[in-house]
């Protein structure tokens, strides 16, 4: 069974990947401050010696590098810290991978395509480091990620929707910024397929084809739970990034449209899937 080490396995994204991938692989998760599962190992992404020691002792075939600060506003306000975590942290992981022979799958973002802010710039720099992984690399570019994770408490967009449901609060969401959402389970499926088929040296955008707003997502999910959603216009000037599905098609990877992922997410929530 192939061994995978997931950095940032307590994050919103990492926790779902950990949960899904451990069905097919021997998965080790690392955390920094939040030990979401008892078996996780501590790894500070700014401490190269510690990273090397952990990676060397686990000796994974593949490192799925998820650690990163995803908050664009925080990165703008804390540029040095953003570089330390998103850029230097990725370089540390790749250097350790090169010393141990591991392949690297890097969780980037569509924000790395023509970056317009520090978050995008640091994710793009991370991609450049990821390409130095000698045994093989994959760069994944999701857009705004939605779907249920074992981590329901981090302040991430999807967890805010869950809070609307739990607290039965009327919700108000922006209509101005449009993006092609990414279902969190789609990322797990793609990572699993890439590792099983030993597909590397690719950069892959993972989204649905349709452009939607935060208001659309909230309305289409929360309406199933009888939570009213009111539109507001934040005049958000974040550029619209359009990606196509050609790479998913070329590599025979799963593809979903918007309606598919909404149905899956509503089922996940209804089933209480993963939630305590
Ligand atoms: N959420 C999205 O919509 C989205 C979209 C595109 C790409 N991404 C990418 O996906 C990744 C995860 O995003 P997320 O939304 O799941 O973030 P999140 O829930 O806010 O988690 C951030 C993660 O970074 C870890 N971390 C921060 N500083 C660290 C350090 N010094 N050493 C080790 N770990 C550290 C945290 O560990 P602890 O909690 O243990 O401290 C946590 O696991 C990021 O790389 C992000 O760029 C996210």
Image: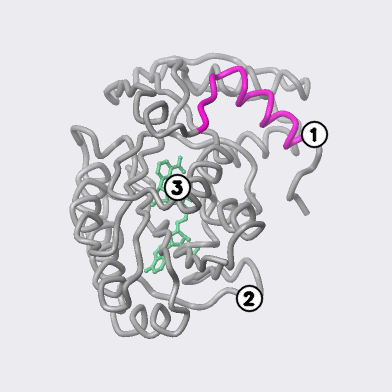
x then y, percent, for residue 274? 73, 50
Quadrant where the C terminus sits is: bottom right
Query: Of all residues shown, which one is farthest toward the front?
Result: 197
For the residues labelled 2 and 3, the Cα–Cα distance comes to 25 Å
| Mark nearer the N terminus (2 vs 3) | 2
Q: Which numbered marker is on residue 261?
A: none
Q: Which residues are magenta?
A: 254-269
Q: Which numbered marker is on residue 270?
A: 1
Classify residue 81 as left or right of residue 244: left
x then y, percent, for residue 233? 43, 15
Instruction: Note whether 163 is above or below 126 in the view shown.
Output: above
Answer with the quarter of the image where residue 219 lies: top right
- Helix, strand or loop for the magenta stretch, by majority: helix
For the residues labelled 1 and 3, the Cα–Cα distance comes to 30 Å
Label 1 beta carbon within 8 A of ligand 1: no
Instruction: Note whether 11 is above or below 270 in the view shown.
Output: below
Label 2 beta carbon within 8 A of ligand 1: no
Q: Say whether residue 268 is magenta.
A: yes
Disc 1 crowd rating (10 Å Cα; few below 14, some 14-19, many 20+) is few
Q: Nearer the viewer, residue 99 or 82?
A: 99
Q: Say whether residue 256 is magenta.
A: yes
Question: Residue at 54% across / 34% down in the picture?
Answer: 183
Classify residue 270 as left or right of residue 70: right
Instruction: Note whether 109 is above or below 228 in the view shown.
Output: below
Quadrant where the N terminus sits is: bottom right
Label 3 beta carbon within 8 A of ligand 1: no
Q: Which numbered marker is on residue 194?
A: 3
Classify residue 182 as left or right of residue 176: right
For the residues labelled 1 and 2, the Cα–Cα distance comes to 28 Å
Q: Which residue is mark 2?
A: 39
């Amino acid at each position: 069974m192939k061994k995978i080490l997931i950095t940032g396995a307590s994050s919103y994204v990492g926790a779902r990947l950990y949960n899904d991938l451990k069905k097919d692989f021997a998965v080790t998760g690392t955390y920094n401050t939040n030990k979401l599962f008892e078996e996780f190992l501590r790894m500070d992404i700014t401490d190269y010696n510690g990273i090397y020691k952990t990676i060397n002792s686990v000796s994974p075939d593949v490192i799925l590098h998820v650690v990163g600060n995803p908050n664009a506003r925080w990165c703008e306000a804390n540029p040095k810290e953003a570089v330390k975590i998103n850029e230097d942290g990725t370089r540390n992981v790749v250097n350790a991978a090169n010393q141990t022979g591991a392949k690297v799958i890097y969780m980037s973002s569509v924000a790395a395509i023509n970056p317009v802010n520090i978050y995008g710039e640091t994710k793009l720099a991370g991609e450049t480091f990821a390409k130095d992984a000698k045994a093989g690399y994959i760069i994944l570019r999701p857009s705004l990620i939605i779907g249920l994770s074992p981590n329901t408490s981090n302040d991430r967009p999807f967890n805010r929707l869950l809070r609307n449901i739990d607290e039965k609060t009327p919700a108000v969401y922006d209509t101005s910024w449009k993006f092609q959402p990414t279902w969190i389970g789609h990322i797990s499926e793609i990572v699993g397929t890439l590792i099983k088929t030993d597909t590397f040296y690719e950069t892959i955008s993972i989204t649905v084809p349709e452009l939607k707003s935060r208001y659309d997502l909230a309305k289409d999910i929360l309406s199933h739970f009888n939570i009213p959603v009111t539109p507001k216009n934040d005049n958000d000037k974040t550029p619209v990034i359009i990606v196509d599905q050609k790479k998913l098609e070329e590599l025979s990877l799963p593809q979903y449209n918007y309606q598919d992922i909404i149905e899956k997410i509503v089922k996940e929530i209804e089933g209480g899937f993963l939630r305590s």
